[in-house]
Image (spheres, helix red, strand yellow):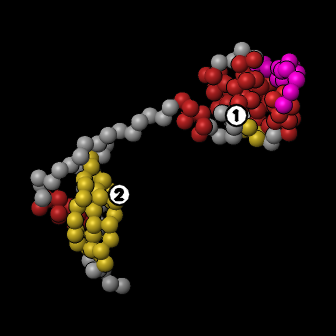
Amino acid sequence: MEQEAFEVVEVHKITDTERADTYVLDVTLSINGVVERHEEYLSSPTDPYGANPAIRLWMNQNPDAQVHPYVPPTPPTIEEIRTAMPTLTARQLRLGLVANGIAPSAVQATLDAMPDGTDKEMAQIEWEYATTFNRTHPLIAFVGASLGLSDEQIDAMWVASVDL
């Protein structure tokens, strides 16, 4: 098998990372004569494989190349965290309620207290027939608020219910 030959054609951007002497490069490489752009090539000082030796050689020969500072990722918002929470089965949801001292009949009473109409009918169908529940579904917020639960309490119950 022929060894691949790497050559740096152009470095478009170098960005620092949270690890020392490790960079993300937007780089155009020639690999056995085929020119390809790699927009996120991770280069670390101890990687002897692939294009990394050629990239490190280029960086040593171009010490004044601009290195953009590392910008840590923005922490997710609480809504993004809730959206990413796993779905619960109807069983997990109901067991989680019971484990926290909330009888399913209390949820039913909340739904029964809704004004007659489409919203009530849809909520009832969701409660009775849904096989899974998403943390951000409006029914979860409505029932939780009706039962006097804060969003944080619902979050904690949700996470605990995943393992039920």
What residue is pinned by disc 2? 40
Indicate which disc residue 137 carries.
1
Q: Is residue 80 left or right of residue 149?
A: left
* Residue that lies at the very extreme toward the bottom in this rendered image: 1
Residue 4, picture quadrant: bottom left
Residue 113, picture quadrant: top right
User: Which is nearer the N-term, disc 2 or disc 1?
Assistant: 2
Residue 60 or residue 46, whichever sits in front: 60
Q: Which residues are magenta?
A: 99-118
- The x, y position of residue 47, in whole percent, is 29, 61
Quadrant where the image shows the N terminus:
bottom left
Residue 134 visible in the picture: yes
Mark 1, secondary structure of its residue: loop
Residue 105 within the segment the image draws in magenta: yes
Residue 124 visible in the picture: no
Image: 124 above or below 110: below
Mark nearest the camera among 2 and 1 is 1
Image: 44 above or below 8: above
Disc 1 marks a residue whose amino acid type is His
CA distance for labels 2 and 1: 36 Å
Residue 44 within the segment the image draws in magenta: no
Disc 2 marks a residue whose amino acid type is Glu
Image: 134 above or below 61: above
How many labels were placed on the picture?
2
Q: Is residue 23 left or right of residue 107?
A: left
Q: Is residue 108 left or right of residue 77?
A: right
Quadrant where the image shows the C terminus:
top right
Q: Is residue 104 left or right of residue 87?
A: right
> Tag 2: Cα neighbours inside 10 Å, few (<14), some, or many (≥20)?
some
* Residue that lies at the very extreme toward the top in this rendered image: 148
